[in-house]
Image (cartoon, helix red, strand yellow):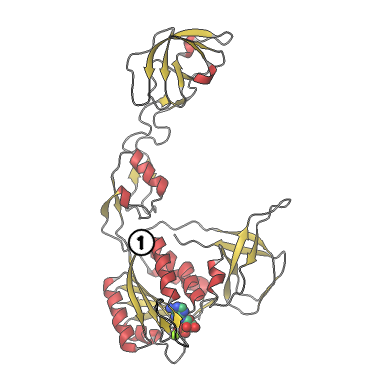
Amino acid sequence: MIPFAEAKRRVLDSVTCVTEPEETIPLHAALGRILARPVVAVAPVPNHDNAAMDGYAVRTADLSSATPITLRIVADLPAGSHRSAPLRPGEAVRIMTGAPIPPGCDCVVMQEQVQRQGDQVTIPPGQHPGQHIRLAGEDIAQGTEILPGGRRLGAADLGLLTALGRTTVPLCRRLRVALLSTGNEVVEAGTPLTPGQIYDSNRAALRAALTLLGVEVLDLGLVRDDRTAIEAALQRGATEADALISTGGVSVGDHDLIKEILAKEGQIHFWQVAMRPGKPQAYGQLGKAHFFGLPGNPVSALTIYLLIVRPALRKMMGALPQPDRSWQAVFRGEWHKRHQHMEFLRGVAHQGDPPDQMPWVELTGAQGSGILTSLARANVFIVLPEKPLHLTDGTLVTVQWIDYD
Ligand code: AMP
Ligand code: MG
């Protein structure tokens, strides 16, 4: 049995980015995918100085700091049009938000502030050079790196790339992850249960988690605790996928075959981690695929996935490491921890209430490794160190945001 931190480190150290060669993909299909290389702005955004308000473009040299000044309107510039003739003394241009600032103008006056009569506009004092003008390149300067390689593309990123005129992006190829459920008692939902049977909730949850991560899932289905059937499924996964995740059959029971098969057909790097939930688990290699043998208990399987497998898959995908999203919170409730394993309780974190504003956290209910509602209701793990502890109202604990992406 190895400590949780060591298990996580050993897994992260042994995986590498496997998503070469890069592929060029239309932007509309790039959401959630990983950028293979940095993107550099080939042009500034915006590409010209433009009006930030509807109003009048003027020369501040014509204005007075003491009295209103009347100017003659010489042009009307809606967004989408432009004027190349420089403004002369005493002139103003009617301008709409987004329209390029005509040469010679250094100020836009909001239309709410002026008085207009025919082609005359009267500007009050108090206007400043540069007022209500968005400068070329103020969002993105030409030549800057706007997105780093390894970035997982979000909605605003696709907007940025489009603002630069991009229609395609270089992406890492999608990681392929094979998923297998094992267990004589496990059946597909859709058929009535006979006594002793349960539905395959693990594959549904893990498949969803992998989808949120943006990998391609190779569904190996559900097999009985049968050596030949498991071997055949795993061999298929090992040849077709980059990583392989199984659930069930990884403990010490009579029908727990995963460890034996992995030892015979591949290599086991470690088995059993001092964490709760999730002690029985195997990590190793089968062919070229990294193998994660998760236990059958639904909370254990998903917790190990979130805390160990997911960071490893992200590294394999070519994604940048994520910043730590944990913080200190005040525990409310009671919890006795008597064992010497790291523990990941499922909790709901709340923002602090006045007057002290200290964030606080409570348990989601019963914490057994088969109580999937404890994880479904949670937004954080309450991370408890190895040593035995007694949590009561007011104990300070570390909470870690539950991230699927
Ligand atoms: P195992 O790790 O095979 O000893 O299974 C531990 C527990 O998890 C048992 O109660 C199993 O019935 C349950 N279990 C195993 N596989 C699944 C699954 N795919 N979905 C839901 N529960 C499962
Ligand atoms: Mg089993």
Q: Is residue 65 above or below residue 237?
A: above
Residue toward you, 331 or 362: 362
Q: Is residue 38 above or below residue 362?
A: above
For residue 138, side relative to residue 274 (left or right): left
Q: Which residue is mark 1?
A: 317
Q: The residue tagged with tag 1: helix, strand or loop?
A: helix
Q: Quadrant of ligand 2?
A: bottom left
Residue toward you, 5 or 208: 208
x and y percentages locating residue 95 in the rendered image: 42, 20
x and y percentages locating residue 34 in the rendered image: 35, 55
Residue at 32% across, 81% down: 266
x and y percentages locating residue 166 in the rendered image: 30, 42
The answer to whether one can see residue 316 in this image is yes
Q: Quadrant of residue 320?
A: bottom left
Q: Quadrant of residue 10?
A: bottom left
Q: Quadrant of residue 342?
A: bottom right
